[in-house]
Amino acid sequence: MPYDHLLVETGAVATLTMNRPERRNALSLAMMRELITAMRQLAGDEQTRAIILAGNGPAFSAGHDLREMIGRDLPAYREVFDVCTELMQTVQAIPQPVIARCTPWPRRPAASWSRRATSRSPAPARGSPHRGSTSPVLHDANGGTDTRGRRKRRSKCCSPERRSTRRPRRSGAGEPRRPGRRSGRRHASAGRTYREASSFTVALGKQAFYTQIDLDQAKAYAYAKEVMSMNALAADAQEGMSAFVEKRPPCWVGR
């Protein structure tokens, strides 16, 4: 079937290319729905053994399309996060592995990342908690919570810090083994990243992380969707999204 925001190449290794380069492949509602439809169609094709998710242009994906999320009401935000959750659950549910062909700025929903890419968690910098607290990779095959790397994921939910995906994936990767000048620089850098974020969002992200971490996957998704939908109405969330679209520094008010 034809798609407005997606290029589809079928075969043993199919490729889905997000095709909104003028918006850095931002995840609009329409494109998320197209991704869901395309993945479900490929799931029923026995000839398709794997799916590559790519982005047309210089960026993989800039995340949610903030232009669709400024000045909306609660039902509209719930719809966005419902569809986003459905997309992430579709990535998990289909039988084929989904591999992201990442340029810099990799984004969910794919299940593995390019080793040469770098990632950023910009949501706190835009006034919203990070969706990574309930990402599919946080849960084991039995639906329980994977407790490895909690500290790393907690930081990701609250901080807009840039990270390299070259780091080893084991728990505690990147942490200094003994105190020293490098340790001091890391702590100073972490302090700066939190100083630049919304205090309201950091507090909300921390609370949400500890509330959902021991929930089963379905309950964690439901909780995170409601938190993010309600947060989108907050003054800092609206300010963060507007500042990003207008390419200016945000002015936080702490609510």
Image (tube, rainbow, N blue to C red):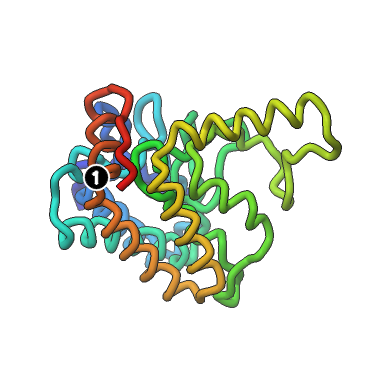
Viewed as shown, does residue 223 lie left or right of 50?
left
Q: Residue at x 49, y 50 (%)?
A: 157
Image x and y of residue 168, in percent: 72, 42
* Residue 223 appears anywhere in the view: yes
Crowd band around label 1 with a 10 angstrom C-alpha radius: few (<14), some (14–19), many (20+): some
- Classify 129 as above or below 90: above
Q: Quadrant of residue 44?
A: bottom left
* Residue 37 appears anywhere in the view: no
Image x and y of residue 76, in percent: 16, 57
Q: Report the amino acid beneath label 1.
A: Ala
The residue tagged 1 is 235
Q: Residue at x 41, y 55 (%)?
A: 204
Q: Residue at x 34, y 38 (%)?
A: 126
Q: Residue at x 46, y 46 (%)?
A: 52
Q: Nearer the viewer, residue 240 or 100?
A: 240
Q: Nearer the viewer, residue 55 or 185?
A: 185
Q: Secondary structure at mark 1?
A: helix
Instruction: Count all numbered tags in the image, as a single digit.
Output: 1
Q: Quadrant of residue 74?
A: bottom left
Q: Nearer the viewer, residue 116 or 254?
A: 254
